[in-house]
Amino acid sequence: MLQRAYRALRTLGVGGVLHAARNRVIPDRLSCFSDVRPLLEAGVGLEIGGPSAIFSVRGCVPVYPVAGRIDNCNFGSQTVWEGQVVAGDTFVFDATKPAGRQHVAEAAELDFIGNGEYDYVLSSHCLEHLANPLGALKEWKRVLKNEGLLVLVVPHKDGTFDHRRPISTLEHLIQDYDSGMPESDLTHLEEILALHDLARDPEAGGFRAFAERSRRNAENRCLHHHVFDTRLAVSVIDYMGLQIRAVETFRPYHIVVVAQKLRPAQQADNRSFLDSRLQRVRRSPFPSDQRASAL
């Protein structure tokens, strides 16, 4: 028990441990959840990766308890996070609900799904594992109905083992998209091996084991190709032409963006989210966000 407490302290810090303790009693909640809940209750969703604790009954965005049906897409039939993944009607997102359809496919290759099939798309801590995130987001947008919702969760660098790495730029993500970057890419491996904080990633083992696992990323998809802060998360969604409805941040490392696919004649206006001085982004607990908003 002492070893587990020490590991939590090293990983989350004092503030993170205190927050986790409080969160066991009073879970954090997305402040706009009551506004988007009717859209989630009435529709059929697709989750990329998962199942994810953040969408469970005690999560920040408790979609599972109110959803009618959620299908799922995972990249392989065996993953580090879920173990064996079996295609078919096997995706159990809530014990009280019928299982959704499980697809085994790449997140950016959803051609077996028609345009506008889903009322909402969920993704928690998946986008950073993709070598070509804009390519994936383009597909997720395509399978959304007009006025459908994207609920995207990405890790904030300050709260993760990425805290030593530089934040990725939107320009870099655009270059990856334009070049058709494949999931076998290891462009960032040298940086990751030099700056990854293993003290915050005890499950990775020692450096030698971590390096070996990282070189086999095409098999396991454990690497974080790109590093996010809140500004980048917002910029990416704006670049995709989605209308942002809410941006909130939660300890220990969550950035949550809720966005809507507009009808063809409409154009997104996200200026109030892109300009931190306008304060449409809920105040962040992460130091790098606070420094950026002070500029």
Image (cartoon, rainbow, N blue to C red):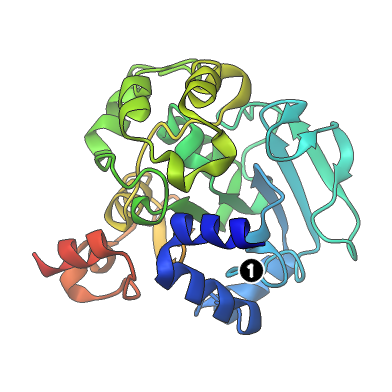
Q: Give how far across and how far down residue 37 sits, in percent.
A: 64, 74
Taking the image as shown, residue 172 lies to the left or right of residue 261, namely left
Q: Give how far across and how far down residue 276 sits, in percent.
A: 20, 67
Quadrant (top left, top right, bottom left, bottom right) of the N terminus: bottom right
Q: Give how far across and how far down residue 138 sits, in percent.
A: 47, 36
Q: Residue at x 41, y 35 (%)?
A: 134
Quadrant (top left, top right, bottom left, bottom right) of the C terminus: bottom left
Taking the image as shown, residue 65 lies to the left or right of residue 126, namely right
Q: Residue at x 71, y 65 (%)?
A: 56
Against 27, residue 46 (above or below) is: above
Taking the image as shown, residue 272 lies to the left or right of residue 251, namely left
Q: Residue furthest front?
A: 2
Frontmost residue, 192 versus 46: 192
Q: Quadrant of residue 190?
A: top left
Taking the image as shown, residue 273 lies to the left or right of residue 241, namely left
Q: Quadrant of residue 86?
A: top right
Frontmost residue, 177 versus 61: 61
Counting every numbered tag in the picture gives: 1
Q: Residue at x 44, y 45 (%)?
A: 199
Q: Quadrant of residue 294?
A: bottom left
Viewer can see residue 260: no
Q: Which residue carries the number 1 mark?
A: 59
Against 239, residue 286 (above or below) is: below
Q: Secondary structure at mark 1?
A: loop
